[in-house]
Image: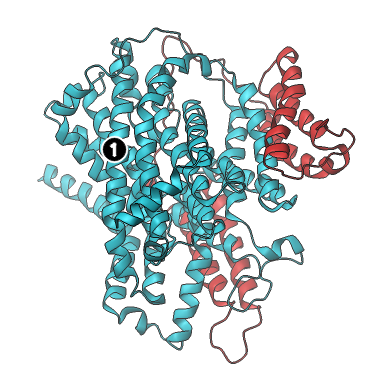
Chain colours: A cyan, B red
Amino acid sequence: MLKTLIDAFALISTWEVIIAMIAASVYGLVIGSLPGLSATMATALLVPVTFYLSPIAAIATIVAASSMAIFSGDIPGALLRIPGTPASAAYADEAYAMTRKGQAELALGAGVWFSAVGGIAGVLSLMILAPPLAEIALSFSTFEYFWLALLGLMCATLVARSSPVKAIAGMFIGLLVSCIGIENPGGIPRFTFGITDLFGGIEPIPALVGVFAVAQVMRAMLTPEPPPLPRRRFGSIMAGQWKLTKLYHWQMTRGNIVGIIIGVLPGAGADMAAWVSYAMSKRFSKEPEKFGTGHVEGLVEAGASNNASIASGWVPSLLFGIPGDTIAAIAIGVLYMKGLNPGPTLFTEKASSMYAIYLMFIIANILMIPLGIAMIRVAAYILLAPRSTVMPIIMLCCAVGSFAIGNNMFGVVTVAAFGVIGYVMEANGYPVAAMVLGIVMGTMVEQAFVTSLIKSDGSVLPFFERPVAAILAAMAIGALLWPVMVWVWRKVKPMQTAAATTR
Amino acid sequence: MRLPDSVTGSFLVVLGAAAAYGGYILPPVPGQPVGPNVFPLVIGCGLALCGLAIVFGIGHSFEEEEELVPFENGQAASPPPQSKLYGLRALLPPALLLFYVAAADRLGFIITAAIMVYVTSTALGAKWKLALPLAALSPFAIHLIFGKLLRVPLPAGLLPTPW
C-alpha cells in the first residue's frame, strides 16, 4: 500500500507530468469559459496531443482539462447569463441574478470553492468504490458484461433530456456505426461498401470531435454572437466561502453524493448532475421562494455536484470500460492507446498507475482554487476574443488533430461526416451523447452478446441463470420499461384528477 | 435543419431495415450458430422499431422545448435573416474540412489552413482587417505545435516551412 503510494508519487513528480497538468489546466479554464465550447470538446481536442505524451502525463492532461472546464463554465454563466458549458446551464440564471444584486464575487467564489470540494469528494468515491467493485468484477462472465453494458446504454437513454424513443434510436445509430469494419466475430468486412478505409472501422475519437466540435462550429454559423462581457473590478473572491460551507454543509454533502451517483451511472454526466442537484436543492430548501432571485444555496449544491460527477464517472470506465459520461468515453480511448486497458485487473497489476490517477485528480482540484481565482480576474479579457477568431482555430485543430490520430486523411473525412450527423441529430432532438456511447461501447456489447450466445448454444435462458446476471438483467429491463411506466402514469393521473373534479 | 418527426422517423425505419438486411446477407461462420450477422440484425430491427415509434409520435410528450435565453433590455441581436441560403451556411465547416482533405497534399498545410481560417472567420462576421492577419499567423502557430513539437507529418506542399 505505502510502496504503491510512493511509486505513484514518483510517477507524477516528473517535469513532463507537472507541465502537462498546468498547461492542460489553463487550456481547460479558457475553453470552458468560452460560451459554446464545452468540456467534452476541450477534452476531445486534447486527444491528439496525448499521443505524444507518456501514459501518466496523457491522463493528467485529460483529468486537469476536464475538471477545470466544468468549473470555468460558471464564469460566463454568472457574468453574462450564458453558460460556458452545458454543466453550468442549470444555475446560470441564479448566478446571473446574484451578479445583478452585486454579489458576483460570492457567486463565482462559490463556483470555485464548491467545485474543488465536489471534485475531491468525487475522487474519494473513486478511491473507495473502485477496489471492492474490482473484486466483484473479477468473477464476471460475458453474461454479466453483456447486461452491464446494456444497463449502461439504457441509463444513457433514461437521463437524456429528450424523448426516450429518440435517445434509444440515437444509441442504435451509435451501435450501428460500431458494426462497421472487420473487427467482428467472423472477421469479415461488414458495412464497408468496398472502401478500404472503412475496414478498420470508425474510430471513436474522430467521431467525438466531429459531433462535439465541428457541429458546434456549424451551430455558431447560424446563431448571433454573444454580447461582450462588461468589465468589472472584483473584490475578494474567497471571502465568505467558509461561512457558506458551514451554513450549507448539508446541501454541499447532498450535492456531492448526488453528483457521485450520477457520475457512476453510465452516460449521465456533469450537466445531468447539476440539473438534478439544483432541482433537489430547491425542493428541499427551507426558503424555496428565494430561488431564482439570486440565492446562493442552489449554486452550492449544483456546483458541488457537477464536479463530483467528473471523478466518479471514471469508476465504471476504469473497471469495465463503460464510460460514466462523454468525457470518460474519451478517457477510455486514451487509456486503451496507452496500454492501460480498462478492467478489474488494472487495480491489481497497475495499482501504482491507479494511485497516480487519484493523486492527479486531487492535485487538479486543489490547483483549481488559485488558477480559478486568476481566471475569474482575467475572464473579461479572454471573453473579449470574438467568435470569429476562436472558431477558425477550432476548425484547424479539428482537421490537424483528426489527421494526427491515424496519420491519414480519412480521419478528417470522419470528423466532417460526424459533424453533419451530430448537427442534424441535435437539431431534431436526438441526443448525441447516446450515439457516442453506442459507438464507444458497440464492440464490447457485441463481443459479450455473441460470446454469450455461443456459450449458451443459442439459448436465452443462461442469460438469466447466474445471480448477478439476473439482477443486472432485471435492472436493464426495468430501465427499458421505465419510460413506458412514466407515460402510463401521466396518462392515468389527469384522468384521475378529472374524475375527482367532476365528482 | 429542424425536420418533422415523420421524416426523421421514416429515415430511421429505412436505415434500420437496410442494416438488418445487410446483416442478414452476411455469410455465417461455418459450424457456429451465431456469427457476425446477428448483431446488425438485432440493431437494425431495433432501429426500425424506434423509427416507427417516432413516426407515430410515441414519446413526443417527453421532449422539452429548447429554452431560449432571452436577452434583457433589448440586447437581442437583429433577428437572423430567414432566406433559404442562410441555412446552408451551417454546411460550411464540413465543406472546408473536405476541402482540406482534397487540397492539403497539393497546396500544403500552411496555404490550405490559411484559406480555411480566412473563410470561417469571414463567415462568422470578421472584417478583413481581423481575418487576414489571423489567416496569416494561426497556421504557423498550429504548425509549430503539431508539426514541430508533436511531429505530426503535415504536408509541406508548395510552401515549405522555414523549420
Query: Can residue A460 be seen in the rendering of this structure?
Result: yes
The quadrant the N terminus of chain A occupies is bottom left
Q: At 73% across and 39% down in the image, what residue appears? A: B147
Q: Is residue A23 above or below residue A130?
A: above
Q: Which residue is outermost to the right?
A: B158
Element under label 1? Answer: helix
Q: Nearer the viewer, residue A311 or B130?
A: A311
Q: Nearer the viewer, residue A63 or B45?
A: A63
What chain does badge 1 belong to?
A
Q: At 37% across and 62% down in the image, what residue appears? A: A347
Q: Is residue A454 above or below residue A383?
A: below
Q: Which residue is outermost to the bottom?
A: B31
Residue labelled with disc 1 = A118
Q: Nearer the viewer, residue A462 or B38?
A: A462
Residue A103 image offset from top left, x and y in percent: 28, 13
Q: Is residue A268 above or below residue B134?
A: below
Residue A191 image offset from top left, x and y in percent: 67, 67
Label 1 crowding class (10 Å Cα cut-off): few <14, some 14-19, many 20+?
many
- Residue type at tag 1: Gly
Among the 4 quarters of the image, the one containing residue A69: top left
Q: Is residue A186 left or right of residue A310?
A: right
Residue A196 image offset from top left, x and y in percent: 76, 64
Q: At 22% across and 53% down in the image, what residue appears? A: A492
How many numbered dots are placed on residues in this image? Answer: 1
Q: Is residue B82 above or below residue A216?
A: above
Q: Is residue B34 left or right of residue A72?
A: right
